Structures are given as C-alpha cells and as structure tokens.
Image: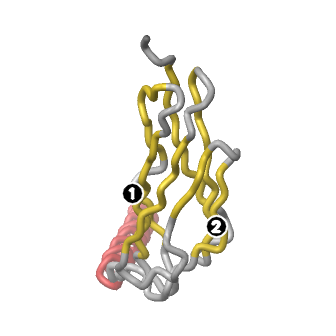
Amino acid sequence: MKTKFLLIASSLLLIVTTLIAQNELKATNDKPEKPKKVTGPVANFDKPTIDLGELIQGNPGTASFKLTNDGTEPLVIATAKASCGCTNLSYAKDPILPGKTIVISATYNAASLGDFAKTITITTNASDQPVILVIKGKVVEKKK
C-alpha cells in the first residue's frame, strides 16, 4: 500500500513539475510583438462631426475637417460627396503626401429653418470603406 501511494505521489509531482517548467519556458520565449509597420496611405480625420451651432437663415456656415496622411504613400481622395445640394465642398485635389495635412471645407447654405445634419462621404485609396463626416446645427430666423 505504501509503495502504491509513493508511486502515485511521485507521478503527480513529476507531472506538476513538468507543467510548471513548460509554462516558464513558454513565458521566456514570448517576445513582445513589434507594432506592424503600416504601408500605403492612411487617412486620419481630426474629427468625424462638427456642430455649427445656430446659423441665421440665409447666412451660410462652414465646417473645416483636417485630413492627415499618416501612411507611407500618397493619399488620393477619389470622391467627396455631400448628402444634398445645400452643402458645397472645397478641398485640394492633389495627392496628399505622407505626413501632410489638408482641409476639407463644407459650407451649408442655411436656407431652411430648423435642425439639420448633413453628411459628407469621402472615398480614398486608403480603404475600400468610405469615411462619413457630419455637419450639424440649427438654422434660426433673422431677428427683425
């Protein structure tokens, strides 16, 4: 009976020791992952939404979105579309070199009274998915 107990205890001790040694070996071989180097263009907008606040009817409001190329290759804006004809867009059409920033201006005409939220859809060579920017606010009546 003593021999059987000693054999089982020795086997358990051997198994536990082996498991602990394997975990320590695994931990010492783990190297911290290096951040993946980004290649190609990367579009980085300063903010996705701009609130223009209250606009007086008939006085347009302009929002300016900063777009920075945080990649390694030139960034090209393929398309930039506003959700309606009441919003005009203005931006440089040249490729944006790595590390450079441009401004995309969106001007809302403020013709209709009330709350508004207009989207600007930007498609670039950085991603298959477009980026949606938003300008919002409220148009109020002129004070007499």
The residue positioned 43% from the left and 56% from the top of the image is 65
Q: Nearer the viewer, residue 127 or 107?
A: 107
Is residue 60 shown above or below 95?
A: above
User: What numbered label is drawn on residue 117?
Assistant: none
Q: Nearer the viewer, residue 2 or 123?
A: 123
Mark 1 neighbour density, 10 Å: few (under 14) some (14–19) many (20 or more): few
Check the image and name the residue furthest to the front. 144
Is residue 69 shown above or below 130?
A: below
Mark 2 neighbour density, 10 Å: few (under 14) some (14–19) many (20 or more): some
Dot 1 corresponds to which residue? 46
Residue 16, horizontal then vertical, whole percent: 38, 68
The residue positioned 52% from the left and 26% from the top of the image is 57
Is residue 45 shown above or below 42?
A: above
**Figure quadrant of residue 22:** bottom left
- Is 129 situated left or right of 10 in this image? right
**Figure quadrant of residue 51:** top left
- Disc 1 marks a residue whose amino acid type is Asp
Q: Secondary structure at mark 2?
A: strand
**Figure quadrant of residue 23:** bottom left
Quarter of the figure that contains the N terminus: bottom left
Residue 75, horizontal then vertical, whole percent: 52, 80
Quarter of the figure that contains the C terminus: top left
- Is 95 situated left or right of 81 in this image? left
Dot 2 corresponds to which residue? 123
- Disc 2 marks a residue whose amino acid type is Thr
The residue positioned 60% from the left and 31% from the top of the image is 111
Mark closest to the chain's N terminus, 1 or 2: 1
Q: Nearer the viewer, residue 115 or 13?
A: 115
- Is 123 situated left or right of 15 in this image? right
